[in-house]
Image (cartoon, rainbow, N blue to C red):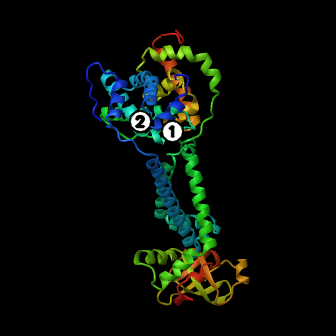
């Protein structure tokens, strides 16, 4: 049963196959909990939200287009849930404007960077550097930890591909600077 | 949904239990199709209103003769900018921003930068507005109906306002030539309710003097004096046929 793709299970779940949906929960529970850990600090809050994410996913399952990948779809639901929770927790829940979506940016070649830096960046992000800005933190998590492609991240965040590329680069640069100020050699 | 956490139940069990107990209302595919259809309809409505507003802006500039100001140097340009219907343009831009936000719900929308999508919508709206104005004659028909008081009040006033009653001392005149004395024209201001004779002075070597004749309607821009205009530019008045029938 496990050899089937997420999309195949989603298709079966759309036909009221609850077991199939259970497989999707199994596959994504740990990933979404890890993703949520970067937004919120309390374990119980994260678990509650991830549970809500799965409930929302099931409720809206028939909006999933099986010709697309399942992963960005559920990460999109999770992203919205975590952002909403963050906004509720802040004192000034202002509407944020993504100015970097206003212009087009060149798209850097993913494959070269990813292979070379994957392991290094995973270690750095996993060390839990909270000094990095939340916008860059999220994109680094999606790209290096969750290993989504630029296209998939664009679908999660609903931004242009060039913006994803620019944010990954800026996030990486910001992380390097933080390491430098902490006198840690990048890659240690 | 309340997150009850009975002892020993993991997250997956809690989710599946909620599903089994029918606590989760599952939206049908028709629900999502309906949402998309509604979004598309609202977007089309916003685009249509935007096109009609741009069409009206272009129409009002045309029938008022204000587009002639663009050919009268930098002073003409400044006047054009002064009399341009900015509130309508701002309203239209606001509408396009709302439309853009709607289109970003779709992949083709959010995959493009905000500026790019906005410019595409702006160009499309202006272009279609131009075609609607010049190609369909809808604005002209609406203006004629407004003159006959056949349009509901706000729309009737709106269309009649497209002629842009000129403020006094603006240096702009939509006039009928009553006499030509060398480089000085005697003219009658079309916009005045009472006859308002005007003396328009052109430069002596202005080539248009050769083509003007008594009875011609002209659009004049220049320095206003008391009953006089020292013309910076003069053109045949293109909006003549859009005057109220009493002025013809």
Q: How far from the left and from the top, in percent, is residue A67?
A: 58, 38
Asked which secondary structure carries label 2, the reply is helix
Mark 1 or 2, which is nearer the eye? 2
Determine if residue B175 is in view.
Answer: yes
Cα gap from disc 1 to disc 2, whole angstroms: 21 Å
Asked which secondary structure carries label 1, the reply is loop
Residue assigned mark 2: A58
| Relative vertical location of residue B246 with respect to residue A114 in this rendering, above or below | below
Q: In the drawing, what numbered circle is on residue A158?
A: 1
Q: How far from the left and from the top, in percent, is residue A92?
A: 32, 36
Q: How far from the left and from the top, in percent, is residue B224?
A: 53, 76
Q: In the drawing, what numbered circle is on residue B248?
A: none
Q: How far from the left and from the top, in percent, is residue B82?
A: 51, 65
**Residue for point 51% across, 87% down:** B196
Using the image as rendered, state which of residue B153 and residue B195 is in the foreground: B153
Subunit that carries the residue with mark 1: A
| Relative vertical location of residue B86 with respect to residue A5 in this rendering, above or below | below
Subunit that carries the residue with mark 2: A
């Amino acid at each position: 049963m496990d050899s089937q793709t997420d999309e195949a299970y989603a298709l079966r779940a759309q036909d009221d196959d609850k077991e199939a949906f259970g497989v999707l929960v199994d596959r994504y529970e740990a990933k979404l909990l890890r993703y949520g850990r970067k937004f919120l600090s309390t374990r119980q809050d994260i678990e509650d939200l991830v549970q809500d994410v799965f409930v929302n996913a099931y409720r809206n399952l028939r909006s999933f287009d099986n010709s697309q990948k399942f992963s960005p779809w559920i990460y999109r639901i999770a992203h919205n849930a975590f952002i909403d929770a963050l906004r509720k927790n802040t004192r000034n829940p202002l509407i944020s404007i993504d100015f970097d979506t206003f212009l087009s940016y060149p798209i850097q070649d993913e494959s070269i960077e990813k292979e070379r830096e994957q392991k290094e960046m995973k270690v750095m992000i996993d060390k839990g550097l909270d000094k990095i800005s939340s916008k860059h933190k999220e994109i680094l998590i999606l790209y290096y930890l969750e290993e989504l492609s630029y296209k998939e991240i664009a679908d999660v965040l609903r931004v242009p591909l060039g913006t994803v590329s620019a944010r990954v680069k800026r996030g990486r640069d910001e992380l390097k600077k933080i390491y430098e100020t902490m006198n840690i050699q990048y890659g240690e | 949904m309340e997150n009850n956490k009975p002892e020993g139940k993991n997250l997956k069990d809690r989710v599946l239990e909620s599903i089994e107990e029918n606590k989760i209302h599952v939206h049908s595919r028709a629900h999502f199709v309906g949402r998309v259809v509604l979004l598309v309809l609202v977007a089309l409505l916003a685009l249509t209103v935007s096109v009609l507003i741009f069409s009206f802006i272009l129409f009002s500039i045309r029938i008022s003769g204000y587009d002639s100001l663009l050919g009268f140097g930098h002073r003409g340009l400044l006047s054009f900018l002064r009399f341009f219907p900015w509130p309508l343009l701002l309203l239209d831009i606001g509408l396009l921003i709302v439309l853009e936000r709607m289109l970003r719900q779709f992949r083709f929308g959010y995959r493009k930068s905000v500026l790019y999508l906005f410019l595409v919508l702006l160009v499309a709206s202006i272009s279609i507005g131009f075609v609607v104005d010049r190609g369909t004659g809808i604005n002209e028909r609406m203006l004629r109906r407004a003159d006959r008081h056949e349009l509901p009040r706000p729309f009737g006033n709106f269309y009649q306002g497209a002629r842009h009653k000129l403020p006094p001392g603006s240096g702009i005149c939509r006039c009928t030539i009553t006499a030509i004395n060398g480089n000085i024209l005697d003219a009658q201001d079309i916009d005045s309710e009472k006859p308002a004779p005007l003396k328009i002075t052109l430069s002596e070597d202005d080539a248009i003097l050769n083509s003007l004749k008594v009875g011609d309607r002209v659009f004049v821009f220049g320095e206003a004096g008391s009953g006089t205009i020292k013309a910076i530019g003069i053109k045949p008045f293109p909006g003549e046929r859009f005057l109220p029938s009493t002025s013809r």
